[in-house]
């Protein structure tokens, strides 16, 4: 009975393996894109942005453009010993050097993401990452089991 379905199963297993590989590749490429964006911003330090901080928004200006960024548009805040990074959209971020910012401004940036919002993001991110990885691994495991049988 297995031999009857063997040609069909082989083509499905190749399809599942291909889909799983693309899903895993997309996951790791998205992580690489964040690292690349950070590196590009570090390399383009000559294009200096000027930020004015207000109670409900940040006004950003440079030689070529200006924009108003509401604090509630900040979706993620990362911090290390030298910088604080605020993501406003998937491929848009603002990097602030801590040494150039006053403590009230740093606290305002840190407080834009409340603990409730942060915990919801972590839960959603963890669930999404697990689901994404499982979607990639299931076809690979099925294909490996088919090869064993």
Image (cartoon, rainbow, N blue to C red):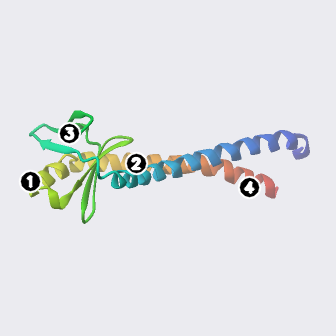
Q: Are marks 1 and 4 in contact (CB under 8 Å)?
A: no
The disc placed on residue 144 is: 4
Single out the mark in the foreground, 1 or 4: 1
**Gap in Å between the C-alphas at discs 1 and 4?**
56 Å
Residue under the point 24% across and 63% down: 82
Q: In terms of secondary structure, where does tag 1 sit?
A: helix
Single out the mark in the foreground, 3 or 2: 3
**Gap in Å between the C-alphas at discs 3 and 2?**
29 Å
* Residue under pointer 2: 125
Q: In terms of secondary structure, where does tag 3 sit?
A: strand
Residue nearer the viewer, 19 or 146 = 19
Q: Which part of the image, by quadrant, shows the C terminus?
A: bottom right
Q: Are marks 2 and 1 in contact (CB under 8 Å)?
A: no
* Residue under pointer 1: 104
Counting other residues with Cα less than 10 Å from the Cα at mark 1, is it few (<14), some (14-19), or many (20 or more)?
few
Question: Is 145 situated left or right of 8 in this image?
Answer: left
Residue under the point 13% across and 54% down: 107
**Gap in Å between the C-alphas at discs 3 and 4?**
52 Å
* Residue under pointer 3: 60
Residue 81 placed where, x, y %? 25, 66
Q: Which part of the image, by quadrant, shows the N terminus?
A: top right
């Amino acid at each position: 009975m297995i031999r009857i379905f063997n040609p069909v199963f082989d083509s499905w297993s190749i399809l599942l393996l291909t889909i799983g590989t693309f899903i895993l590749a997309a996951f790791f490429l998205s992580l690489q894109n964040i690292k690349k964006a950070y590196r590009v911003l570090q390399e383009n330090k000559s294009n200096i942005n000027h930020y004015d901080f207000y109670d409900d928004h940040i006004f950003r200006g440079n030689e070529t453009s200006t924009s108003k960024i509401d604090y509630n548009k900040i979706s993620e805040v990362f911090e290390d010993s030298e910088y604080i990074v605020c993501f406003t959209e998937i491929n848009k971020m603002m990097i602030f050097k801590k040494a150039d910012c006053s403590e009230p401004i740093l606290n305002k940036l840190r407080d834009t993401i409340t603990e409730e919002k942060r915990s919801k993001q972590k839960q959603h991110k963890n669930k999404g990452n697990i689901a994404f990885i499982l979607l990639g691994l299931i076809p690979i495991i099925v294909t490996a089991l088919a090869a064993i049988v």
